[in-house]
Image (cartoon, rainbow, N blue to C red):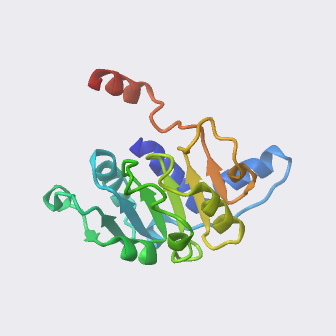
Amino acid sequence: VAEFTLGLVISSLRQSFKSHVQMKNGNWKKYMGRSISECNIGILGAGRIGREVVRLISQFNPKKILVCDPFVDKSTLKKFKINYVDKKELINLSDLISIHIPLTNETKDFFSMQELIQMKPNCHLINTSRGGIINENDLYNALESREIGGAAIDVFENEPYRGNLKNLENCIITSHMSPMSSQARSIMEHDV
């Protein structure tokens, strides 16, 4: 899941998915993107997967890694240059936010229009955690109106997903593929 997340981070920031679509349609078009090293990377949730995303992404030397998790054991991430922030700081300061929290009553619609409009206009939102954490209708509206720069969504409230996000060029959608590697599936089967 962490590796898949990193792939979405890079594809979203560098806009390689747009070039892929253009090339399939016979068009040679280049897109300007951003490097991870230019960004403040926000990580929401520092459990097993969130910590692994921190480890992987730290190799790209982002400007800052911002972690929001009130339950995190700060000693487990002390070897990385981490800035612990609250939800408001995460939303206001991040150039990209990657979500790694469970879906609960408290995290349902954790990102709705109220949060989305507080983000930087070029912020990207990545969700490989659980559907329902982002209000999908609000995300669609924020992306369509360019309130935020982009999103990459692998999990949805209702799957298989049939909603409007598929119509947006600034949104990558995948079919809940983040745990779909032979190693990940083997671990999941073992843990059951």
List the single residue furthest toward the front.
105
In this picture, is 95 found above or below 167? Answer: below
Say which residue appears at 47% left-offset and 47% top-offset: 128
List the single residue furthest toward the right.
26
What percent of the width, then of the height, locates residue 25? 84, 46
> Horizontal placement of 116 versus 25: left or right?
left
Q: Is residue 64 in view from this perspective?
A: yes
In this picture, is 154 found above or below 63? Answer: above
Say which residue appears at 44% left-offset and 78% top-offset: 92
The quadrant of the rendering that contains the N terminus is top left
> Horizontal placement of 171 versus 117: left or right?
right
What percent of the width, then of the height, locates residue 147? 63, 73
What percent of the width, then of the height, locates residue 71? 21, 58
What percent of the width, then of the height, locates residue 187? 32, 27
List the single residue furthest toward the left.
75
Say which residue appears at 58% left-offset and 58% top-offset: 151
Quarter of the figure with residue 67: bottom left
> Horizontal placement of 137 versus 47: left or right?
right
Query: Nearest the camera: 108 or 129?
Result: 108
The quadrant of the rendering that contains the C terminus is top left
Q: Is residue 11 in view from this perspective?
A: no
> Horizontal placement of 98 versus 138: left or right?
left
Say which residue appears at 40% left-offset and 25% top-offset: 185
Quarter of the figure with residue 41: bottom left
